[in-house]
Amino acid sequence: MITGRREKELKEAAAFIMRNVTAVVGDVSLLEDLDRLYAVVKEKHGHIDILFANAGAGTIAPLAVATEAHFDQTFDVNVKGLFFTVQKALPLFKDGGSIILNSSVSNVLGLPGFSTYAASKAAVRNFARAWTLELKDRKIRVNAMSPGAIETPALETTTGLTPEQAEQAAAQFASQIPMGRRGKPEEIAAAVTFLASDESSFITGVDLAVDGGMAQV
Amino acid sequence: MTRLNGKTAVITGGATGIGRAAAKRFVEEGAFVFIFGRRQEALDAAVADLGANARAVKGSVSNEADLDRLYAAVKAERGSLDIVFANAGAGGPLPLGQITAEHIDETFDTNVKGTIFTVQKALPLMGPGGSIILTGSSAGTTGAPGFTAYSASKAAVRNLARTWAEDLKGTGIRVNVLSPGATATELAKEALGEEGQKAYGAMTPLQRMADPAEIGAVAAFLASSDSSFMTASEVAVDGGLAQL
């Protein structure tokens, strides 16, 4: 089951995945959308084994000029949205399942102009700690996964950077990364699959950095 | 899975415990494995169990000549090396007030100096796509009463990966730390007894000690291209022990 706000992109994603996929249009910051999502999950499958709470967003807004709307939007999606994405999944969750929270290397880095985004991702990392304890009796593992700079369209399309700024940012990221390049979405998917599977059966409460070393050295 | 098909791996401290579990998993995934350890009897038993794609070399990581023999054997039979699991480690408790110079030297010789030379001497055989895994410990980030030398040595190991990720920039070789918590190896089970195992299990959010195979599975992930965008990372496999 995949969920996202944009119907056209969701349909394209479902076509790309090809099989064993259902798409539900919705916004994680709207609780009624989450209710609709889980109603469909319940009807179709009856339960959940794996949850990847991945939806997130961040726009550039330096401290001196950031608006209340900017602040609320960032935390509504990244923190509140993720919180209720997990809470509302719990009744359907099978004991022994795996929850993966998409944080970011910015949870430990200072990124000028992105302080709300970075703070929201630090909150996400910390959810994994408390929830590990809250869900331990159900044997549900909860981990954060923190990507670094990844080659997705988001940098160009959603951050509010101009194309030139986005290009500069990408080049700057690459120079700051010990591996000397940005990551590919497939490399993040491999790490998430590892955390979803029994291969990581003794890993819980961690923040798995998949960042080419960007925030590690 | 056969993610390590055709790869050559070295595992120090490979005859028993976590190293042995990783060796088993690496061989199952298609790798050819050299295990390195101090006790011939344990090495023989491990190789007999691991089968045709395993070799044993006897030696200590704190002895440079032994490491030279290890890598000469790898070079002679395989020509190159893809994976190094620098796993050999040791260290008992000795509370502050009773610590001796000998105790510090012994612990750091194996855990820090041994790890450094295990990796340095492997590099001439390694190339792009190579993966180095260092065994850290949850003790590297927590206080472990009585374990001054051991905990400090494991904090040092975690930090080696930071510098080496930079030193290895451009080589295509990744280096990560795998930090186990309480793990039910034969040695640990013997040392802790039933009561001790229960106590360690109770301290861990997952309410149990790890099976060594669970650590081996994570070592295989770090050895494989599934972790291709990870370097300088620490992966805690501790049931949440040092994470909260």
Image: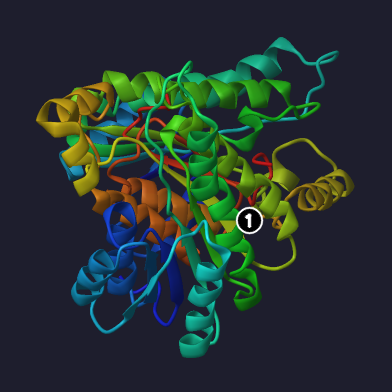
Question: Which chain is home to disc 1?
Answer: A
Q: Is residue A99 left or right of residue B50?
A: right
Viewer-side residue, A92 vs A11:
A92
Q: Quadrant of residue A132?
A: top left
Q: Is residue B40 left or right of residue A10?
A: left
Q: Determine the residue positioned at 38% across, 18% down.
A: A130
Q: Where is mark 1, residue-wise? A: A183
Q: Quadrant of residue A157?
A: top right
Q: Quadrant of residue A34?
A: top left
Q: Is residue B168 left or right of residue B3?
A: right
Report the coloring of the rendering: rainbow
Against A153, residue B48 (above or below) is below
Against A178, residue B119 (above or below) is below
Quadrant (top left, top right, bottom left, bottom right) of the N terminus of chain B: bottom left
Against B137, residue A20 (above or below) is below
Q: Determine the residue positioned at 51% across, 37% down.
A: B102
Q: Examine the rendering and report whether any part of residue B136 can be seen.
A: yes
Viewer-side residue, A102 vs B45:
B45
Q: Residue furthest left?
A: B194
- Three-letter amino acid code at the position of disc 1: Gly
Viewer-side residue, A81 vs B168:
B168
Where's residue A138, x and y in %?
Answer: 18, 27
Viewer-side residue, A48 vs A21:
A48
Q: Residue furthest top?
A: A68
Q: Is residue A85 left or right of residue A216?
A: left
Where's residue B43, x and y in %?
Answer: 28, 68
Where's residue A53, x and y in %?
Answer: 43, 35
Quadrant (top left, top right, bottom left, bottom right) of the C terminus of chain B: top left
